[in-house]
């Protein structure tokens, strides 16, 4: 039986980030009415971006998880955009990001 190589493509990049402060999720909900936040169902807030098309989970601890990016650069851009948008409102800024993308490769 001939040996074949798997075709590997990156489908989704997941980035985790931390800002060194607590985040008021209720304030973000007031400032950005399009976010999804149902604390009785899930402790994180969902902040969706149209460009790059991603969803970032934001937790009151300052931790974030960004999903849906197609590359590491796109994930970094999305995390920085989310932090920058909230920074204007809640005082956290991109310079405070501690760690970034973890990539998930899937075989077809």
Image: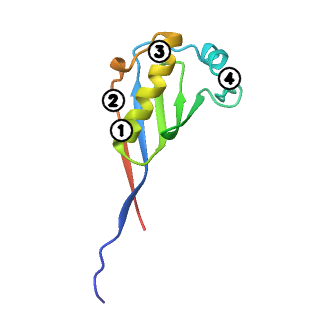
Q: CA distance from mark 2 to mark 1?
A: 7 Å
Depth check, mark 3 against mark 2: the one in front is 3
Q: Residue 101 got which mark? A: 1
Pair 1/3: label in front: 3
* SS class, disc 1: loop
Rounded to the nearest angstrom, the CA distance separating label 4 from label 2 is 28 Å
Q: CA distance from mark 1 to mark 3?
A: 20 Å
- Residue underneath mark 2: 99
Measured in 3D between alpha carbons, the distance from the residue under mark 3 to the one under mark 2, in whole angstroms, is: 18 Å
Tell whether 87 sits left or right of 27.
left
Q: Which mark is residue 33?
A: 4
Q: Position of residue 67 (x, y in %)?
A: 49, 41
Q: Residue 100's spot in the image, x, y percent?
A: 35, 33
Q: What is the quadrant of residue 28 in the picture? A: top right
- Between disc 1 and disc 4, whose residue precedes? 4
| Of marks 1 and 4, the one in the foreground | 4
Q: Badge 2: few (under 14), some or many (20 or more) residues near its Cα, within 10 Å?
A: few
**Residue sitting at x 42%, y 48%:** 70
Q: Tell me if residue 80 comes above or below residue 72 in the rendering.
A: above
Q: What is the quadrant of the N terminus in the image?
A: bottom left
Residue occupied by mark 3: 87
The mark lying in front, picked from 4 and 2, is 4
Q: CA distance from mark 3 to mark 4?
A: 16 Å
Residue at 45%, 22% in the rendered image = 83
Q: Are marks 3 and 2 in contact (CB under 8 Å)?
A: no
Q: Are marks 4 and 2 in contact (CB under 8 Å)?
A: no
């Amino acid at each position: 039986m001939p040996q074949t190589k798997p075709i590997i493509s990156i489908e989704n990049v997941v980035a985790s980030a931390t800002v060194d402060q607590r985040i008021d999720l209720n304030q973000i909900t007031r400032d950005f009415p399009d976010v999804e936040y149902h604390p009785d169902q899930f402790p994180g807030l969902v902040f969706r971006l149209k460009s790059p098309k991603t969803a970032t989970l934001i937790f009151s601890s300052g931790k974030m998880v960004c999903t849906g990016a197609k590359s590491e650069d796109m994930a970094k851009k999305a995390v920085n955009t989310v932090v920058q948008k909230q920074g204007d409102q809640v005082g956290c800024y991109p310079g405070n990001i501690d760690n970034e993308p973890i990539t998930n490769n899937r075989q077809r």
